[in-house]
Image (cartoon, grey):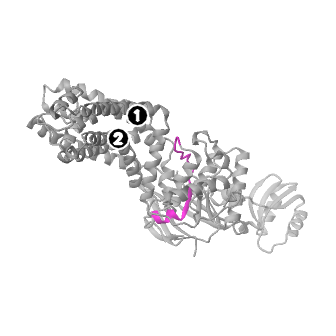
Amino acid sequence: MPLVDLHQVCHSYGHVRALDGVTLRLEPGTIGLIGNNGAGKSTLLKIMLGLIRPESGEGSLLGFPLGRTGRRLRRELGYMPEASASVPMLKGVEYVALSGDLYGMPHRDALRRAHEVLGYVGLGELRYRRLEEYSTGNLQRLKLAAALVHDPQLLLLDEPTNGLDPAGRQAMLGLLEDLIAETRKSVILCTHLLGDVERLCQHIVVLDRGTVVRSGTMESLRSDVRNRYELGWEGASEPILGALRSAGVDVWRSTPGRAMIVVPDGWPTSELFRLALREGVVINHLKADEENLERLFLRITRPTGASH
Amino acid sequence: MPIDIARYHAWEGKLGATWHGVAAMVRTGLLQVFRRKSYWVVIVMGLFQFLAFWAVIWAVTQAKELPTDAREAMLEIFGFTGTPRPGKENGYTMFIERQAVVVMILLTFTGSLLVGSDFRNNALAFYLSRSIDRRHYILGKLLTIGVLVSLLTTLPALLLFLEYGMFTSSFDYWLANWRIPLGIVFYGMVLSVVLSILLVCISCYLQRMAPIAITWASLFVLLRPLRLLMRETSIYWGLIDPWRDMHFVGRLAFDQFRSDDERYFAYWAAALLTTVCSIALVLLVRRVRAVEIVE
C-alpha cells in the first residue's frame, strides 16, 4: 500500500490556486517536502492531516481516502507543528500525556507512554519541569515526543529544526536519524532547510506554485545533470565557447575563463581538450558538477523564462 | 518490569472515542487554574463565604427547641432562607448571587490562561492536529469554565441544601423541598453556560489579561450603575445588567418572584441572554475556524 497516493489534487483560496493538479505516489520511507513560500506545502500538509478537503481530485494517505476521514486519519499520524504550541502551567510529562489523551489513548496508558517517549527523546530528567522552563531545543524534542506518544505509522514534521542553534540542530537531526533507523517509521519532513532534507530523506518532493516539479530520490533528481561540468581555461573566451556550442554542448553559465557546460550523452570529455587545442586555449579546470540539494532546488524552481 | 528508555517501544493499545479528548481538556484546564497560586486567593474568598453560610445553618439547626419559624427568622438575619416562602428570595439563589463576585474575579484571570494563551502560543495547532476537531476544542474550553463556575456556585449551594436537611435529623426537609436542588442545578447551569460562552468568546479575541479584565469588568461592573441610572427611562434598561438577567432566569426554576413584573422580566432576560450567547457562539466558532493549524 502506498503511503501517499494523490491524483490531480487541486485547492484554491479565493482566486489563488494553492495546489494545481498535484499527482503524487509515495512509498513508505523518509520523504522531504520542499518548496518556496507559497509553493503549496502548507496546503498539502493540511490535506494530509485531514484538516481541509481538496476542491477536486482524489487520493489516499495510509489507505484513508482524503478529506472524508480527517479524525480517523489523524490517529495514524503524529504531527509536530512548527509553532511553539505550548500550554502554560503544564509539566513536560503532562503535555505529552495530554497529546495522548487527545488522540484517544486511555489516560493511564498516555501517562505511562509519556514517560517512555520523553526518556527516548532525551528529556527524561526534565519531564517534571514546566513548559515555560524549556529551551527552544528541548521544546522541539518535547513536540516530537508529543507526536510519538500514540506510536503513529507516519510522522509529519513541520520545520523540526526551526530556531535551533547549530549544536541543537545537529542534536535534533541525530535524534531523528536514530528514530527513523530504529522504528522504520515513515516520515514526511517539511522544511526550508535543505541540508536537513539532504541528511534525513530518501525521497524528495519539490513543489513550485502548487505543482510537483520533481519527485524522486536525490540520485534520480541529480541524474539529469550527470553530463554537467565546470570548465575553466586560460585565453580568449569567445572562440572556445563558440566551438563548444557548435559541437552541441550546452553552455549554462559563463564568466571570463569559466563556464558551466552540459555535454551530450556519450560525448567524451577528451573532445574538450581537442577543441581547446584547436582554439588556442589551455584548459586549467575540469570538474564534474556535484550538485547539492540547494542548487538543484534553485535550478528546478527557477521562474519560467529566466536565463541560465 | 523496568523499561529501557534508550530504545523506542511500540504501543499496542486501542485508541478510544474522540470525546476522551474533551475530558482531557477539562482536566488539564482545571489543573492549569489550580496550579496558579494567586488564583487560590480568589477561591479561598469563595470558600470563606461558603463556610460562613455553613456555620450559620449549623448553628441555627442546632437550636432544636426553637420552632421552625423562629429558626428561619434567625437565618434571615444572615440573609438566608432555607425554606421557600412567598415573596421571599430563596436562600440558595442568594448564596449563588453572592458568589458571583468571586466567580467574576476568578474568570477575569482564567480567560487569558485557558483560552488567550492558546491563541498567543498557537497551541491550537497542538490541539487540532490531534484527533479532536474545532467543536471538541470549543466544547472542552466551555466545559472547563462551566465546571469552574459550578465548583464555586452549584456545588456549594447543593452542599448547603444537604447540610440543612442533614442537621434537621429527618428527611422531611429534603422531601418537602425537592424542587430546590433542581432549581440550584438549573441556576448553576444558566451561570455556567452564559459565563463560559461570553468568557471564551472575549478571550479568544482579546487574548491578553488586561484587555480581557477591562472588558469583563465593564460587562459585569459598569453595566450595573448604568442600569440604575437609566431605569427611570424605561424598565427595559434593566436588561443591560447581565448578572441581574442571569439571576432572574435562574429564579425561573424556583418560580419565586416578588411580583408578576419580575416574572415577565425573567422571560425577557432569558430571550436576551439566549440572543447574546448565540451571537457570541457564532463569533467564537468563526474565530477558532480562522486559526491556521499549519503555518
Q: Position of residue B255 (x, y in %)?
A: 15, 42
Q: Is residue B51 above or below residue A12?
A: above
Q: Is residue A167 above or below residue A209?
A: above
Q: Are marks 1 and 2 in contact (CB under 8 Å)?
A: no
Disc sitting over residue B43 in the figure = 1
Tell me the chain of label 1: B
Residue at the farthest left position: B260
Q: Position of residue A273 (x, y in %)?
A: 89, 65
Q: Is A47 in front, or is B182?
A: B182
- Disc 1 from disc 2: Cα separation: 11 Å
Tell me the chain of label 2: B
Q: Indicate the quadrant where residue B11 lies.
A: bottom right
Disc sitting over residue A7 in the figure = none
Residue behind mark 2: B149
User: How many labels were placed on the picture?
Assistant: 2
Residue A129 visible in the current orientation: yes
Amino acid beneath label 2: Val
Q: Position of residue A234 (x, y in %)?
A: 88, 54
Tag 1 and tag 2 share a subunit: yes
* Residue at the image point whose x is 55% and y is 62% from the top: A77
Q: Indicate the quadrant where residue B39 lies.
A: top left
- From which residue to which does the magenta span run? A70-89
A128 left or right of A168 in image: left
Q: Quadrant of the C terminus of chain A?
A: bottom right
B228 left or right of A93 in image: left
- The nearer-to-camera label among 1 and 2 is 1
* Residue at the image point whose x is 19% and y is 40% from the top: B251
Q: Is A8 in front, or is B99?
A: B99
A121 drawn magenta: no
Residue A198 visible in the current orientation: no
Kindly state the secondary structure of the residue where label 2 is placed: helix
